[in-house]
Image (tube, rainbow, N blue to C red):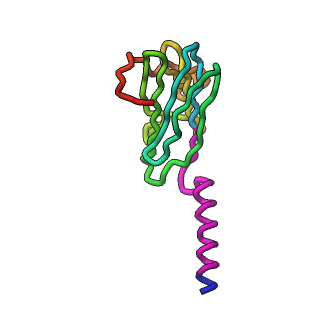
Amino acid sequence: MKNIITCLVLLANILSTVTSSCLFSDQYEVHVVNKMPLPKLKLHCASGDNDLGGNHFNTPNFDFHWKFCENVLRNTLYFCHLSWGNKEVAFDAFKSKKTECPNGVCYYEARSDGIYFAGWTPDPRVPTKVYDWKNHTGKYKM
C-alpha cells in the first residue's frame, strides 16, 4: 500500500511538471495592449476551458497578457471581446492551426480605429490592422 501511495505521489509530481513545461505541446503568450484614449477600454478573454475574466483598462499602454500550453490535440482557441464606448469587437486571439504568432508570441493593440496584430510578414514588429470596431449591439455582456 505504501508503494502505491508513493507511486501516485511521484506520478502527480511528474504530471504537474509536464503540464507546466508544455512537454508535449508548444507554449504561447498572448498580449492585448491598450492604445486607446478615454473612455476606458473593457476586455474579456477566454477559451473553452479557461475564463480569464473581464478587465477594464484605465491606463494607456496597459498590457493584458497570459501564457498557456497548446493542447495536444492542437485545437486550442482563445477569443477576446473588447468594448469601447459604443463600439465593440470580438475576435480569435489564438487559434491552433491558424496561428501566425512568431516565436510563440501573439501581440495585439487596441487603437481608436481598430485592432492591430503584429506577428506575420513583412515586418512582425509593425502591427497591421486586422479588425474594425463595430457599433455596440448589446449581444455581449461584460
Identify whether 23 is placed above or below 118: below
- Magenta: main secondary structure: helix
State the residue in front, 124 or 140.
140
Report which quarter residue 61 is drawn in: top right
The residue at the point 59 percent across, 82 percent down is 4
Residue 102 visible = no
Identify whether 47 is placed above or below 3: above
- Look at the image and tell me in which quarter the N terminus lies: bottom right
Identify whether 87 is placed above or below 80: above
Q: Position of residue 113 (x, y in %)?
A: 49, 13
Q: Position of residue 114 (x, y in %)?
A: 48, 17
Q: Say whether residue 26 is magenta.
A: yes
Residue 31 visible = yes
Report which quarter residue 30 is drawn in: top right
The residue at the point 60 percent across, 59 percent down is 18
- Look at the image and tell me in which quarter the C terminus lies: top left
Span colored in magenta:
5-29
State the residue in front, 69 or 25.
69
The residue at the point 59 percent across, 39 percent down is 66
The residue at the point 61 percent across, 77 percent down is 7
Q: Position of residue 9 (x, y in %)?
A: 62, 73
Number of numbered discs on residues: 0
Q: Say whether residue 38 is magenta.
A: no
**Horizontal relation, residue 81 to residue 28: left or right:** left
